[in-house]
Amino acid sequence: MVLAKSLKELLALLSELPGLGEKSSQRIIFHLLKESPAKVRRIASLLVDVRENLRPCSLCGALSDTDPCGICSDIGRDKSVICVVEDILDLLSIERASFYKGVYHVLGGLISFSEGIGPEDLNVQGLIERVKSGNVKEVILALDPSVEGDTTMFYIIDLLKPFKVKITQLAFGIPIGGNVDMADSLTLTKAFEGRREVEGV
Ligand SMILES: [Zn+2]
């Protein structure tokens, strides 16, 4: 069967997405072709909408359609505790476990010399400004247990040293090389409960 040009292009584009090979992309497309045109139109327009209208929250850096985001503007959240995460996926994973009542700071990546990502590429300055304001009691570093995660963590610890703020790191039940966003809720809850203060600060 010779695929229609549009179908071929859609398949090629979807196959480039993380976690989707050609087979999964085919499955998704042929599933969508059986859905109602209204539903497919809704999915397409929401995709465009989130891409074009979500902006980083000016406080925490999380993508949101409001500024500040829903978490930063929630009066029920404890603004004196900031959990530092690599990206929105880690934030969502922690939110899913629904035990954490503080706020977040989204770095937008981790320092990686092999990939040419330096501290200047991350949303670190915003974190320092928040801590400088003096209303922050604890910064929880919830970064992946990896070379990049450790490098980023030590960099942030150094920057926060001059401030009187408690810095903690997760007690990882997450295996080395594992990811915060892939950890299940129980593992994350335990990693938070057992968090320990970073020594030598
Ligand atoms: Zn926010």
Image (tube, rainbow, N blue to C red):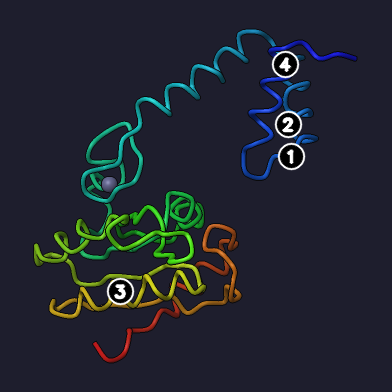
Helix or strand or loop: what does disc 3 sit on?
A: helix
Q: Would you place residue 20 above or below residue 127 in this image?
A: above
Q: Position of residue 127 (x, y in %)?
A: 22, 60
Helix or strand or loop: what does disc 2 sit on?
A: helix
Mark 1 residue's CB less than 8 Å from ligand 1: no
Residue sitting farthest toward the top: 37
Helix or strand or loop: what does disc 1 sit on?
A: loop
Q: Would you place residue 42 above or below residue 14 in this image?
A: above
Residue sitting farthest toward the bottom: 200
Q: If you read the primary sequence from the N terminus, does the residue marked by circle 3 or circle 2 appear first?
A: 2
Helix or strand or loop: what does disc 4 sit on?
A: helix
Q: If you read the primary sequence from the N terminus, does the residue marked by circle 2 or circle 4 appear first?
A: 4
Q: If you read the primary sequence from the N terminus, does the residue marked by circle 1 or circle 3 appear first?
A: 1
Q: Would you place residue 85 above or below residue 37 in this image?
A: below
Query: Which residue is depicted at the point 47% across and 59% down?
Result: 115
Query: Which residue is depicted at the point 69% across and 28% down?
Result: 12
Mark number displayed over residue 7: 4
Q: Which residue is mark 2?
A: 25
- Say which quarter of the image contains residue 101: bottom left
Mark 1: few/some/many CA within 10 Å (<14, 14-19, 20+): some
- In three-dimensional space, the C-alpha distance between marks 3 and 2, rounded to whole angstroms, equals 39 Å
Q: How many marks?
A: 4
Mark number displayed over residue 155: 3
Amino acid of disc 2? Ser
Q: Pointers 2 and 1 in contact (CB under 8 A)? A: yes
Q: Which residue is mark 1?
A: 21
Amino acid of disc 1? Gly
Q: Position of residue 146 (x, y in %)?
A: 51, 73
Query: Which residue is depicted at the point 60% across and 8% down?
Result: 38
